[in-house]
Image (cartoon, rainbow, N blue to C red):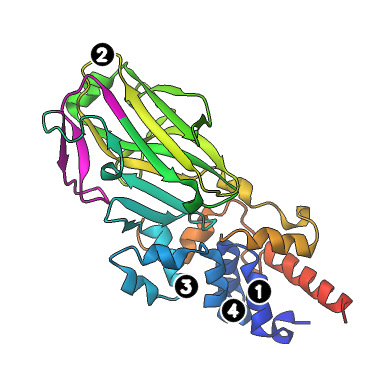
Amino acid sequence: MDFTRILPEECLCLIISLTSPAEACRSALVCPALRSAADSDAVWEKFLPCDYKSIILETSLSATLVSMGKKELYFRLFSHPILILNDTMSFQLEKRSGKKCYMLGARALSISWGDSPSHWTWKSQPDSRFPEVAKLRSVWWLEVKGMIESRILSPNTKYAAYLVFKLTSSGETVFKGRHVSLNVSVDGIDSSRERRVSLHPRDEPRHVRERRDGWMEVEMGEFLNEYGDDGTVDFSLKEIEGNVNKGLIIEGIELRPKDVDKLWRPLGQVGSFKNQFLLRSHWKPESRGTTRDILSSSRKRSDHSGLGGHTWFILLKFLAELISRI
């Protein structure tokens, strides 16, 4: 029996919306009968954050983004960060889960002596998403701080904060063998122990890594945004031991979900269909994004000759509960 021909499209949309972006893409590719439902706005709006409308209204591209279909908008937001808050912060979706990622640009950070041209200069950088980045000329007291409200982050999510930076030739000399302090705290309480690392990639090949956009990053710490209550997350970089510091270029501090693979448990381990519905309903789950981008990022690939196990499992559970109530 072909269940896709029996159930109305509204039911198919509901079923697919309870899976994941990867499953929705897979369903559209391998099952023509599900393509209309799998590509629908009703499905893809469930994968967007619940406050996505207010976020995109803060960008200069709001008119273009609002006019997009929900699937196209999802792909746009995971493949291209958008600038908000007067171009001092960027917003992006994590590709597989639809959870929120933010980067605070250098202008959104508190930088000691940042307004002194003899210590720091502000300049445009062709490979930066922001209009300006901060370039360190020379300071004895290096201190950079940032803050974000936890309520704008995705709830029930483990985040990590990353310093996004570059070293000039003089910076590579100065920071080689020198350690800086990195810290993340939630409401004034350290979320993890302070990290002492070198910003030189040869000193810390496991911690300092090159990004796809050409910048480097180092993890500052991690935290669990459990309920998304009104609170603050603070992060800092310090080197205040009396050394001359120079040659550091700061693009910003990025917050993005960590251990995303652990978010997607096999549905059979979740419990009843009711529990599955409640669990999924809390999940509002770099070239132009494509279906292949999402599918290739999925850790557990199912057989592409048919629907993924997640979709069929939920479909059968839905039908079983429906029949039991007749």
Helix, strand or loop at label 4? It is helix
Q: Tell me if mark 3 has few (under 14), some (14-19) or many (20+) residues whose alpha carbon lies within 10 angstroms of its own.
A: many
Q: Tell me if mark 2 has few (under 14), some (14-19) or many (20+) residues whose alpha carbon lies within 10 angstroms of its own.
A: few
Near-viewer residue (317 or 56): 56
Q: Amino acid at mark 3?
A: Lys
Q: Is residue 271 magenta?
A: no
Residue positioned most to the top:
242
* Residue receiving disc 1: 14
Q: CA distance from mark 4 to mark 2?
A: 62 Å
Q: Amino acid at mark 1?
A: Leu
Quadrant in which the N terminus appears = bottom right
* Residue receiving disc 4: 37
Helix, strand or loop at label 1? It is helix
Q: Are marks 3 and 4 in contact (CB under 8 Å)?
A: no
Q: Amino acid at mark 2?
A: Gly
Q: CA distance from mark 4 to mark 1?
A: 9 Å
**Residue 309 lies in what quarter of the image?**
bottom right
Is tag 2's residue or tag 3's residue first in the polypeptide sequence? 3
Q: Specify start and end residues of the magenta stretch as a single range.
A: 119-143
Q: Are marks 4 and 2 in contact (CB under 8 Å)?
A: no
* Residue receiving disc 2: 242
Q: Is residue 129 magenta?
A: yes
Closer to viewer: mark 3 or mark 4: 3
In screen coordinates, is 255 left or right of 223?
left
Near-viewer residue (5 or 72): 72
**Residue 43 lies in what quarter of the image?**
bottom right
Q: Are marks 1 and 2 in contact (CB under 8 Å)?
A: no
Q: CA distance from mark 3 to mark 4?
A: 13 Å
Helix, strand or loop at label 2? It is loop
Helix, strand or loop at label 3? It is helix
What residue is shown at x 77% (from left), y 72% (from top)? 318
Closer to viewer: mark 1 or mark 2: 2
